[in-house]
Image (tube, rainbow, N blue to C red):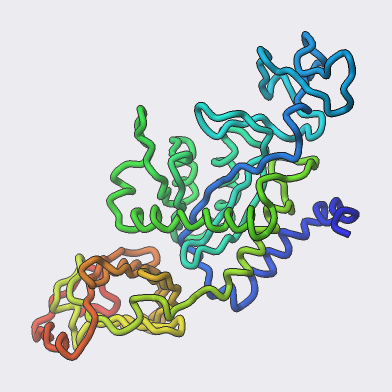
Amino acid sequence: MFSKNRDRLLEGDIAAKFLAAVLAQPKVKKLLSTDFFSVDGTLIEAWASMKSVKPKGGPSGGHGEPPADGGGRNAEADFHGERRSNETHTSTTDPDARLYRKGRGKEARLCFMGHGLMENRHGLPVEACLTLADGHAKRVAALHMIEPRADRPRAITLGADKAYDAEDFVNELRSMKVTPHVAQNTNGRRSAINRRTTRHGGYAVSQRVRKRIEEAFGWIKTVAGQETRTRPRRVGLHLRGCRLQSGAIAEAAGCADMTAPAGCQLIGRWRIIEADLWDRGYLNLGRPATITIGADNNGEIAFGALQAGLDLGYSPSMVFFTWAACDEMDEVTGDGHAELLDDGSIEITFAYHNGDEAILKAIRQTSSTDGVIGVSPEPRCGRLLLYGC
């Protein structure tokens, strides 16, 4: 039935609508981050043989043509000495496919390029598209997918590999208020990413988490049956509703139940012992500073004049969270993450929306650590307070 209805399904954008419906489900929606994203691309081999690549103007010098003595429709072809490029040749089976090589020394293949956008909290794909294969497709598709999510007052982040380290791409992201957490490409060139970006702890986190998008591509190509080929179809710049996009939908739906908080090593109550913006006296203003990471996607953080509820997402050695508190009857919100360090402590990145970002350190609270930190009778104001002193 899919073969008979494929064009109708593609023209109706059914896959994109299905993905939107899945992401709108309450069970899935609470897992999604709206602040941190990663993007990557993968080659999708066209369902066309290299024998179908012919000169655009017709046969040229006999190269690539079947032998004169016959041999059938799939006869042997000799391409030796023939230079083929997308400017001079095209596939008669799939004219939209492009010759593309993955790297130097690699063979050129007829390909499309698939692109995925992932939110970083749980590693769920939130958008996918398929484009013609060329050297700019990755960056063009990334801008296309991230732009709707950047239309908000607070900046968001986008993690990516070295292929996205281009000055025009980075500048375009910054103009959208998207922080480019792009891997630096310093191989014989100057990177467009400097210390302005890399000095923040969130950059290193994005570079670790972004690699999880490869799991989605692997799932689509194996479990979902996409393998590495897509059948011929007429395409524009962005192929919407294609099988790759359907695979991303299935991945998002399949991962919806994979929170596994019980496997997270950060579950429990932690004592906050230091911060880069405030001294210990302010941290323990009125009560010991703590962060509680629950196993039910909820938690709490309390330090200084702030007490906020946390909405949590889990990985084995890290949690991501958004938080909300009240400041004189007005809601104050933010986000952040906590990461388990080698010494058993955790480092917390705590960000205020449209405000500062603080780094806090905490140790697991036990009966032996209850007296480690005393409450100072002379608190000193930090440079960013919710209620003042």
- Can you see residue 304? no
Instruction: Name the spot of residue 56 as percent of width and height, x first.
Output: 78, 19
Residue drawn at 39 percent across, 75 percent down: 264
Residue drawn at 21 percent across, 87 percent down: 366
Q: Relative to residue 119, is residue 306 depicted above or below?
A: below
Q: Quadrant of the N terminus?
A: bottom right
Instruction: Name the spot of residue 260 as percent of width and height, x first.
Output: 48, 77
- Residue lying farthest top? 61
**Residue 2 placement, left or right of 346:** right
Answer with the quarter of the image where residue 16 lies. bottom right
Instruction: Name the spot of residue 268 as percent of width and height, x first.
Output: 32, 84
Residue drawn at 12 percent across, 88 percent down: 371
Q: Quadrant of the C terminus?
A: bottom left
Answer with the quarter of the image where residue 284 lies. bottom left
Q: Nearer the viewer, residue 50 or 309?
A: 50
Answer with the quarter of the image where residue 135 lies. top right
